[in-house]
Image (spheres, coloured by chain):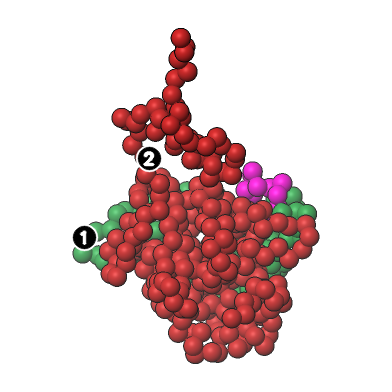
Amino acid sequence: MSRPEDILPPNLFYDDISARKYTSSSRILSIQSDMAHRALELLHLDQPSFILDIGCGSGLSGEILTSEGHMWVGMDISESMLAIAVDREVEGDLLYADMGQGVPFRPGSFDAAVSISAIQWLCNAETADVTVDNRLKTFFETLYASLKRGGRAALQFYPKDDKQRDLICKAAIKAGFAAGILEDEPGTKQVKVYLVLEVGGTGGDITQAVKDLEGVEVQDGRSKREKKKGETRREWIGRKKERERRKGKVVKKDSKYTGRKRRIQF
Amino acid sequence: MKLLTANFITCSVKSCQSVTPALSFRDAELAREEIDFSPLFLRNILPRIDWPLLQRTAKELGFPALPETKPELSPIAEGDEEGVGSEEEQKLLKELHSLLLETSVQSGKLVCANCGHEYPISQGIANFLLPNHLV
């Protein structure tokens, strides 16, 4: 399957023709609306809220937010997509901006943020003077700041591979978010990956985001501290050696003498 | 761009990151569009609004002067699920609704008070793309 990310920069890829195609395809419409509903479900909003839509495109996800009574601001880098959004008279406010350059809002502006099929574009550095790491860092740091305390972000994206998925997750965690990944229909071609982020302060567990949802199983990948009490000296050495080995360092091989004291022989 | 968004937006030029300066409109052309009145949303957003900035923006765009201090709303009474409140509050919320949500700037410029960078607005969409050396 070809990935639009590998073809052209987003502002050029979504030109007038493909932007119109994107917005008129009934298949894309239904997938987009399902994902927007799912993202909204993950946000757990209990009152009409102020939401940021990152990569809003022609406002497909925004219309769902409007129908649920929320007010939104969308940002996108494709002028053609935004032009269609204007034609469709969406209720939200639109901004022509690049998410890799940061979210230009003052701290604590939004209740929540959503993004449908957009943040994988952060991993493209289109000109020589930007780097992927910098784009990710700027995006997540400014997003973190622009959300209010306890605010959530549900970002659906299409990672190219596991490496890219980890790259994006790590950047989010580095910016201070509590992060979790939700996969719908895992293992199939239609897999949908949601990165659920929470701005700290409530001290909550991010797996709470999916607590009440049906058909969700939580895979907790967070490392739990190994129990170290009662461990013998030899076991401790073995553990350290194993860790160094995993790092690819040269480690002395284990033998029956490992961890023994060097006593005087006579 | 709605006045609500303008109240929250800030300059994204690197040298302005630490000050988060407010932006002011220049050569603004206004438009109005009807939006459903949602008192609950206004109650949610009102504590976060930068009131002095809103006063300034309203003055710049030639709207009648707003109250000196941010109005305090009484908590929603029981059984009042829409969050309408008393008649007086409802009038106030309606005014805020029409100013913040229904009024938008169709074309003009947003100017940063700190670095002087100009963000053009056309068709109601502000252009926040920056040249890479400013990011």
What residue is shown with label 2? A225
Can you name the residue that lies furthest to the left here? B79
Residue A229 in the image: state x and y as whole percent.
Answer: 32, 30
Q: What x and y, as percent, mark residue A99?
A: 62, 62
Q: Nearer the viewer, residue A195 or B127?
A: A195
**Residue A145: mark:** none
Image quadrant for the N terminus of chain A? bottom right
Q: What secondary structure is found at the residue carrying circle 1?
A: loop
- Is residue A65 in view? no
Q: Quadrant of residue A83?
A: bottom right
From mark 1 to mark 2, how far is it between C-alphas? Answer: 48 Å
Q: Which residue is mark 1?
A: B78
Q: Is A125 inside the magenta-drawn segment?
A: no
Q: Residue at x 34, y 31 (%)?
A: A231
Looking at numbered disc 2 in the image, what kind of residue is underneath it? Arg
* Amino acid at dot 1: Glu
Q: Which residues are magenta?
A: B9-21
**Dominant SS in magenta:** loop
Q: Nearer the viewer, residue A255 or B44?
A: A255
Crowding around mark 1 (Cα neighbors within 10 Å: few <14, some 14 to 19, many 20+) is few
Q: In the displayed structure, would residue A103 be above or below residue B69?
A: below
Residue occupying the point 50% across, 40% down: A243
Tell me if mark 2 has few (under 14), some (14-19) or many (20+) residues whose alpha carbon lies within 10 angstroms of its own: few
Is label 1 on the same chain as label 2? no
Chain B: give its colour: green
Q: Colour of chain A?
A: red
Look at the image and say whether residue B18 sits in the magenta stretch. Answer: yes
Q: Foreground mark, 1 or 2?
A: 2
Please, which chain is the residue tagged with disc 1 on?
B
